[in-house]
Image: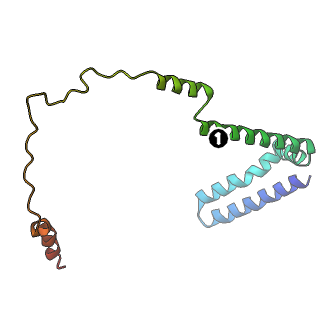
């Protein structure tokens, strides 16, 4: 009975705030506030509030919520342990079989890719390292007056 009264009062206050907001020419915000304020009355009319009030004071319902929490903890704990071990038994067996089978290697994989008679191309000579490396940077700095 008290929950229904509180929900009705909250809805009335919300509708009053929506009316003030609409008076200030903020119609979109007023419509949104009105929508939110109608939700508690709708929950009272559908019986959800009574059901929630009965559930909140029921020891059987709290025991059920406790069992749900315990089931959730057990489920997540087993998932964490399973991930640390490397998956389920089926996944570990499949990984062990894949590791036991030798991979097929291409027959010419060990042969050099250039062929036998060719030698690698000579590398170009390195540019002298001096003031030339920073000439571009110096030009940019001088351009900006730094």
Name the residue furthest bottom: 145
> Foreground: 13 or 1?
1
Question: How was this image coloured?
Answer: rainbow
Q: Residue 12: horizontal and vertical position, in percent?
A: 78, 59
Task: Give the residue at mark 1.
Answer: 80
Is residue 5 toward the left or the right of residue 144 in the image?
A: right
> Foreground: 16 or 49?
49
Q: Secondary structure at mark 1?
A: helix
Is residue 140 toward the left or the right of residue 45 in the image?
A: left
Q: Residue 21 falls in which quadrant of the image? A: bottom right
Q: Residue at x 90, y 55 (%)?
A: 2
Q: Residue 29: horizontal and vertical position, in percent?
A: 61, 59
Q: Residue at x 85, y 46 (%)?
A: 52
Name the quarter where the C terminus is drawn.
bottom left
Is residue 65 toward the left or the right of residue 89 in the image?
A: right
Q: Residue 129: horizontal and vertical position, in percent?
A: 11, 64
> Foreground: 95 or 12?
95
Is residue 4 toward the left or the right of residue 27 in the image?
A: right
Q: In this rendering, is residue 106 above or below 112?
A: above
Q: In this rendering, is residue 56 above or below 16?
A: above
Q: Residue at x 59, y 32 (%)?
A: 87
Q: Residue 96: horizontal and vertical position, in percent?
A: 53, 26
Crowd class of label 1 (few under 14; some 14 to 19; many from 20; radius 10 Å) = few
Q: Residue 75 falls in which quadrant of the image? A: top right
State how many labels appear: 1
Q: Residue at x 62, y 27 (%)?
A: 89
């Amino acid at each position: 009975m008290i929950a229904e009264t509180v929900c009705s009062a909250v809805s009335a206050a919300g509708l009053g705030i929506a009316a003030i907001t609409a008076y200030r020419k903020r119609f979109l915000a007023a419509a949104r506030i009105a929508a939110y304020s109608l939700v508690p009355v709708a929950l009272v009319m559908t019986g959800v509030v009574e059901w929630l009030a009965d559930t909140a004071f029921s020891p059987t319902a709290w025991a059920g919520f406790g069992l749900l929490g315990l089931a959730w903890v057990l489920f997540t704990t087993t998932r964490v342990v399973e991930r640390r071990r490397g998956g389920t038994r089926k996944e570990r067996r499949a990984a062990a079989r894949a590791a036991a089978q030798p991979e097929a290697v291409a027959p010419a994989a060990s042969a050099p890719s250039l062929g036998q008679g060719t030698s690698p191309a000579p590398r170009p000579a390195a540019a002298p390292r001096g003031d030339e490396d920073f000439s571009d940077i110096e030009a940019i700095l001088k351009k900006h007056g730094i």
